[in-house]
């Protein structure tokens, strides 16, 4: 573009760079306003150069010529602005070297002056490259922090959407169960839904507040990074002149702690659905079922499908779930909603035709050889073989020959015993002994589509006469 004569890009009428050029059938081009003004003074629509008549009163635009003219104008403007930037303000000489001591571009006369005596110098391109690399190093933690914040905000958005889905699903289950009880339960139903809505509002408000804070921090970091990146794209002279200010601004930008997910952010589905029919029975005095263990969907692996009453699981298609702290780190497993720290507790599981399952309890993380390891005690059935395993003991085979359909789990926390029984044959399977100290949660695992169901407990009612 620098070697193109300006005359080639000039209109033959106004002798200036083309503005909105159009092309005639004779291939001559003119500014649209110039051509229209020329034709107003003429009887016929003739070319100002060759006098050939035009068949169109509105000739088409010459897009290629217009692009060339716009590029020529931009280059001329850039050359005009860069010309002064490349000159020394003291000696009007070209800035060719960079003073490392003063951290500024200088000319060859400045290099030999007294003020730069015994200073070190570098070629401009070398100095600019070194400074760019240093600024990029300072930007790296900010860019990593921005990525973390954006991921955290994305997780927050997903959590809010999932809270809404949980609310809709939970409300549906509540309504289905309350419809069975007809008008007598109408007031109870309204109370349950109101509690669910209140929790939804509180938890969404908490997540929204966190995301607003993340949004503010993201905006601040984005502005800082954008400004620094603009400096990186500047010319060497402009970049080096502003380098010290830019580096200080980047270095002094405060870095907040990495965002952490909010514990307890999801809807406490258990509070609304756990033992719901039993609670209704207290008011209705009708036949109800009671489950000694409620499975917590907020701990379930994404590949598990929980029943609406939270008492049964099976393997299914993987679902997109938010990353909440309560979710178990063990694949294809789910925990009970209530943990035990003392006393004696029993629950039974109907494994039915399931050929791949584990039953037991999961404890808190245990410090082992410098790393945290979850405490697990369980028996399992896989590949036609029964085994027992605990965190502190190797896996071993169990001498079980008969097919098990229903298994009873009994935890005596205070005596440190976890026992398993064949509920149908009333025979002992295996017992773990350990001095339990931390909270233990019921643990169930399966990779089979056949369901595992917590067996409801037998309920008896005894009326005591007042004396």
Image (spheres, rainbow, N blue to C red):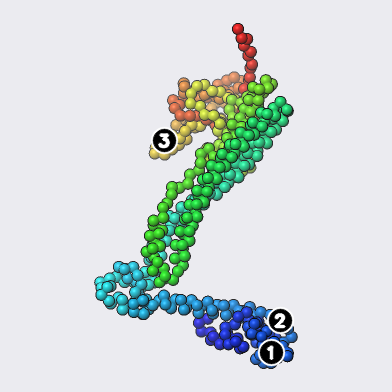
Q: Earlier in the sequence, mark 3 or mark 1?
A: 1
Q: Residues within 10 Å of mark 3 (few under 14, many from 20)?
A: few
Q: Quadrant of the C terminus?
A: top right
Q: Secondary structure at mark 1?
A: loop
Give the labeled residue for mark 1: 41
Decide if residue 229 is on the left or right side of residue 351.
left
Residue at position x 45%, y 35% in the image: 365
Q: Position of residue 114 (x, y in %)?
A: 25, 75
* 271 is higher (above) or lower (below) than 288: below
Residue 436, by quadrant, is top left
Q: Tell me whether circle 3 and circle 1 mark residues in contact (CB < 8 Å).
A: no
Residue farthest to the top, as pictured: 467
Report x, y in % for residue 283. Answer: 66, 22
Residue 338: quarter of image? top right
Q: Quickly name the residue at label 2.
A: 58
Helix, strand, or loop for circle 3?
strand
Give the left or right position of residue 47, taking residue 218 as reference: right
> Which residue has dot 3 on it?
367
């Amino acid at each position: 573009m620098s070697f193109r004569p300006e005359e080639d890009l000039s209109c033959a009428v106004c002798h200036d760079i083309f503005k909105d050029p159009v092309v005639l059938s004779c291939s001559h081009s003119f500014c649209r306003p110039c051509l229209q003004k020329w034709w107003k003074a003429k009887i016929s629509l003739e070319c100002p150069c060759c006098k050939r008549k035009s068949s169109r009163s509105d000739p088409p635009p010459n897009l290629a010529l217009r692009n060339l003219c716009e590029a020529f104008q931009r280059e001329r403007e850039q050359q005009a602005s860069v010309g002064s930037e490349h000159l020394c303000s003291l000696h009007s000489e070209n800035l060719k070297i960079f003073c490392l001591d003063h951290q500024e571009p200088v000319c060859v006369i400045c290099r030999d002056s007294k003020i730069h005596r015994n200073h070190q110098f570098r070629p401009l391109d070398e100095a600019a490259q070194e400074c760019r690399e240093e600024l990029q190093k300072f930007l790296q933690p900010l860019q990593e922090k921005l990525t973390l914040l954006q991921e955290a905000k994305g997780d927050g958005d997903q959590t809010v959407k999932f809270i809404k889905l949980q609310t809709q699903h939970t409300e549906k289950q509540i309504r289905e169960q309350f419809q069975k009880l007809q008008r007598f339960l109408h007031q109870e139903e309204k109370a349950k839904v109101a509690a669910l809505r209140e929790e939804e509002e509180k938890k969404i408000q908490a997540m929204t507040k966190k995301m607003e804070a993340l949004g503010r921090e993201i905006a601040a970091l984005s502005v800082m990074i954008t400004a620094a990146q603009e400096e990186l794209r500047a010319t060497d002279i402009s970049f080096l002149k502003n380098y010290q200010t830019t580096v200080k601004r980047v270095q002094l930008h405060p870095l907040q702690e990495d965002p952490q997910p909010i514990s307890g952010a999801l809807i406490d589905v258990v509070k609304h659905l756990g033992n719901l029919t039993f609670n209704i029975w207290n008011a209705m005095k009708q036949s109800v079922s009671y489950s000694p263990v409620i499975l917590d969907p907020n701990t379930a692996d994404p590949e598990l499908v929980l029943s609406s009453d939270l008492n049964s699981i099976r393997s299914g298609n993987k679902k997109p779930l938010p990353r909440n702290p309560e979710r178990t780190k063990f694949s294809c497993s789910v925990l009970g909603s209530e943990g035990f720290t003392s006393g004696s507790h029993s629950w039974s599981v109907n494994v039915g035709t399931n050929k791949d399952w584990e039953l037991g309890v999961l404890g808190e993380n245990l410090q082992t050889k410098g790393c945290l390891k979850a405490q697990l005690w369980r028996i399992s059935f896989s590949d036609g073989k029964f085994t027992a395993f605990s965190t502190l003991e190797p896996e071993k085979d169990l001498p079980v020959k008969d097919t098990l359909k229903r298994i009873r789990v009994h935890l005596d926390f205070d005596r440190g015993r976890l026992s398993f029984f064949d509920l149908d044959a009333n025979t002992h399977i295996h017992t773990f002994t350990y001095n339990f100290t931390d909270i233990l949660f019921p643990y169930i695992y399966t990779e089979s589509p056949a369901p595992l169901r917590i067996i409801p407990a037998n309920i008896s009612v005894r009326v005591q006469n007042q004396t």
